[in-house]
Amino acid sequence: MTKQVIVTPSGERLVVLPESDYDALVEAAEDAADIAAVAGFEERLAKGEEELVPTAMVDRMLNGENPLRVWREYRGLTATALAEKAGIAQSYVSQIETGRRDGTVETYRRLAEALGVSIDDLV
């Protein structure tokens, strides 16, 4: 790596280097950030703070299916069982899943807790 040091009139030292060297430094920093992110995820996964989900489940949500329904079915719950676990009416769960009704923050908090996910996973 070649560099040139320039000192400004105020005494600040600036380093000039070839673009290819700069690009290599950026790539190395990005690689280090990616490695740290993966290590952090693996640590949270080992602690049970993260989980891996099947691609088919993610595809369903990306294709516009209601996340509440996808998570409920993934957890193997009926709408009635989820409603009981969350302490809300089964009809309310169904209305949220079909988009006929919006849930409150408190409702989503209860549903998320019952499903073992974050509210962000449901909205």
Image (spheres, grey):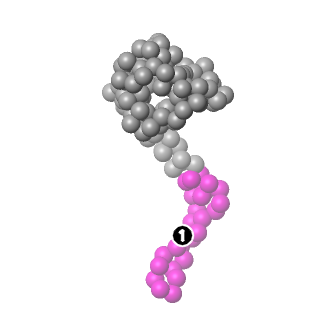
Residue found at x 60% / y 65%: 17
Please determine whether, in this image, residue 73 is positioned above or below residue 118: above
Name the residue: 33% across, 27% down. 47
Q: Position of residue 81 (x, y in %)?
A: 41, 14
Residue depicted at x 64% and y 29%:
64
Check the image and report above or below for 99 versus 81. below
The residue closer to the viewer here, 7 or 92, is 92
User: Which is nearer the eye, 41 or 6?
Assistant: 41
Q: Is residue 2 magenta?
A: yes
- The quarter of the picture where residue 89 lies is top left
Residue range in magenta is: 1-26
Q: Is residue 41 left or right of residue 53?
A: left
Number of residue marks: 1
Residue beneath disc 1: 15
Near mark 1 (Cα within 10 A), the count class, few <14, some 14-19 or many ≥20, is few
Looking at the picture, which amino acid does disc 1 mark?
Val
Identity of the residue drawn at 36% across and 19% down: 85
The location of residue 88, given as percent across then percent down, is 39, 24
Locate the N terminus and report the quarter of the image it occupies: bottom right
Residue 23 is a magenta residue: yes
Q: Is residue 50 above or below residue 18?
A: above
Which residue occupies the foreground of this view, 104 or 74?
104
